[in-house]
Image (tube, rainbow, N blue to C red):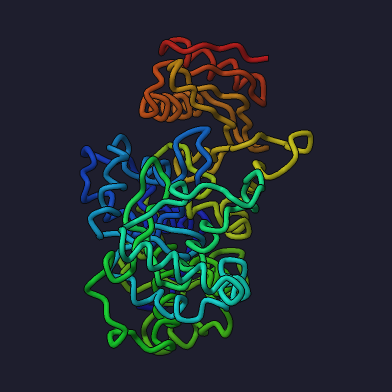
Amino acid sequence: MSELDLSIGAARALHLAAQDLLVPRRRRATKADVLAAIRRMEMLQIDTISVVARSPYLVLWSRLGDYAPGWLDELLAEGRLFEYWAHEACFLPIEDYGLYRHRMLDPEAMGWKYSARWMRERAAEVARLLEHIRASGPVRAADFERSDGKAGGWWEWKPEKRSLEVLFTSGALMIARRHNFHRVYDLAERVHPGWDDSRLPPHEQVRDEFVLRSVRALGLAKASWIPDYHRTRRPHPDPARLAGEGLLLRARVEGWREPVYIHPDHHELARQAAAGSLAPSLSTLLSPFDPVVWDRRRALDLFGFDYRLECYTPAPKRRYGYFTLPILRRGALVGRIDAKAHRKAGLFELRNVALEPGVRLSARLAADVAAAVLRCARWHACPRAELVQAVPAGFGVQLGELLARAGGEAVAA
């Protein structure tokens, strides 16, 4: 294929098509679709914040529409998924275990995720914990009472929890299932009995494979975007070399100096994008941990969308809100919503809706956003959606009226 020239709109369309966010689904999702979506993205990032649905469930909803969240838990318990460190902590297809095994065999290179000092100084405790699991079966961190006098918190894990986590990072333990979203740890040989390290692929082959898979998941990629997707360490393979070997295709995006790379699997999609025949029509809400926005530089390059998650920012310094959901509307990121699901009250609260500067207001825009909000609210078992504040105010009036007609409330300031 000769080198393609893509407009920025075509580049966005190709990216969204690869991420299965181009057009609405035409059929109801099945459990098999959950696994297929994770394979397409390469991974599904895990986060525990639950002001709306926890991130992995929301990422899937953005692509699949209404589906049963329990399917994700079942796929983990059935051994069709496993958990490990990819972009961050992620659900991963079990057939990709060998790609991550190198990380387990060199856990000291995993930074804060592993403590050689802890394993050295607590060797006897760690050995007893492993023997307990071997003899008594899987455990949760909650199975152990805190005995060190500390109050808990993110960085004050009880000793058993720290030991479980370092054993998980080293590959000695795996996550057998989740119970109320809490990890259940078991011996790796019981969770994935079919694995043998004789099947370990060469490290250089794995490095190249991560590049190829990142490019395929993204649809197209600058060289600088690639390492972040799987959080690979230096030295990074040169995608130009892989293109020279015929394993990647090169293309140009209007206005960008450097080339982009496309996986051969997306040859036809890329051709359609260049011809202008990929038309984004999906409007939905995204998780802050969606692959489309988790790389701030990439989201800015592709969509002109400067996104930062503010839940770790002190409240007085937040600009948009605690857990803002990007609004994807027909191929563009047009704004963000700070939302909270009050499930017991059946209320989906829009604390703040902020459109991006320059977004043209229209009745169709308001209708698309309102429809996306209402679908998300109802999937959360919240029949009402309440708008508290919106910028610009004129859009808030339009959106509020549409939500009110659908049985919600509009109390925009």
Q: Nearer the viewer, residue 282 or 202?
A: 202
Residue at the outermost right position: 316
Residue 222 visible from this viewpoint: no
Q: Which residue: 33% across, 59% down?
A: 40
Q: Of 68 and 403, which appears nearest the observer?
A: 68
* Image position of 320 (left or right of 362): right
Q: Who's the residue at 57% across and 78% down the image? A: 108
State the image coordinates of residue 229 (x, y, percent, origin top left). Answer: 50, 66
Q: Is residue 235 above or below residue 136?
A: below
Q: Is residue 201 above or below residue 277?
A: below
Compared across the picture, whether 131 is left or right of 301 comes to: left
Q: From this view, report whether residue 321 is shown above or below residue 242.
A: above
* Nearer to us in this view, 1 or 241: 241
Give the percent coordinates (x, y) of residue 187: 34, 66
Quadrant where the image shows the N terminus: bottom left
Q: Quadrant of residue 216?
A: bottom left
Q: Is residue 329 above or below residue 130?
A: above
Rendered-image quadrant of the C terminus: top right
Looking at the picture, tell me which residue is in the foreground, 320 or 15: 320
- Which quadrant holds residue 24? top left
